[in-house]
Image: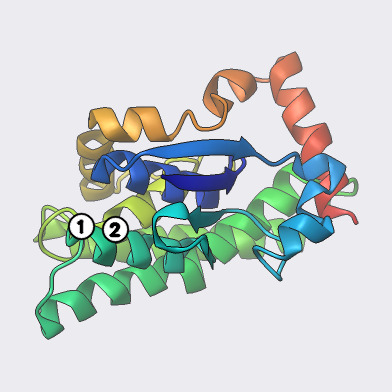
Amino acid sequence: MIDLYTSATPNGWKASVTLEELGLAYQVRAIELSKQEQKEPWFLAINPNGRIPAIVDREVGDFPVFESGAIMIYLAEKTGRLMPKDVKSRSRVIQWLMFQMGGIGPMMGQANVFFRYWNEKYQPAIDRYQHESKRLITVLDRQLKDHEYLAGDYSIADIANYCWVRTHKWSGVSIDGLNHVQRWIKVIEERPAVQRGIKVPVDLDALRRGDGEGAKRVVENAQKIVQR
């Protein structure tokens, strides 16, 4: 059994979708970020950085793993799935995983902060992060022009990038004209394991759909996190 400490964020979905795709037994411990639960001593013992997601693998002596990409690699190697074993193919998957972790995630995350969550609107910052997010998604589009998936077969690289790119509207980033990315999103979002994983620990899409009260609460909770 694996304990998953998570919240409804793209990085959290990376772990839950991977667990669902691999069919691993896990139990969810939802972390309330707006209450700074991730900064409490018991959680810092699992993840010294005080961020979600994190897992504890109870099958191997309560082994903790933090950082979403590291979790994905650990689970893929534990099961021998979602990542090839030969050196070159494995490297391709890790390259696109790192692309998400070093580019897509940080840029879209900052677009969210300045476009959605910051109390004051600073348009140069909004433009900067939205434009860079669009540029990075365009890189994915070029790769997907001649490839069904990012690095050969469906892998943790696709899961990682999908979990962020699927939220492009929330970041204020259009993917109009990026037909290969649109095709890729549609293929992945039809996977039953993905549909289950992105509802862990709650269905955030349902909460923030449109600009109603649900979306307002999501923004208010996020503001408590980013401005501390």
CA distance separating discs 1 and 2:
6 Å
Q: Which amino acid is tagged 2? A: Ile
Quarter of the rendering occupied by the N terminus: top left
Residue 119 in picture, x, y percent from top left: 90, 45
Q: Which image quadrant for residue 206? A: top right
Answer left or right for 82 relative to 72. Answer: left
Q: Is residue 40 above or below residue 86?
A: above
Identity of the residue drawn at 52% across and 52% down: 11
Q: Which amino acid is tagged 1? A: Leu
- N-term-proximal mark, 1 vs 2: 1
Identity of the residue drawn at 76% across and 15% down: 213
Residue 75 in picture, x, y percent from top left: 33, 59
Say which element carries label 1.
loop
Report crowding for label 1: few under 14, some 14 to 19, many 20 or more residues within 10 A (C-alpha): many
Residue 71 in picture, x, y percent from top left: 43, 62
Identity of the residue drawn at 62% across and 62% down: 129
Q: Which image quadrant for residue 207? A: top right
- The residue that mark 2 highlights is 156
Front in this rendered view, residue 197 or 215: 197
Residues under numbered marks 1 and 2 in contact, where contact means CB atoms less than 8 Å apart? yes
Q: Is residue 163 above or below residue 102?
A: above
Front in this rendered view, residue 172 or 189: 189
Identity of the residue drawn at 20% across and 37% down: 187
Say which element carries label 2.
helix
- The residue that mark 1 highlights is 82
Front in this rendered view, residue 164 or 60: 60
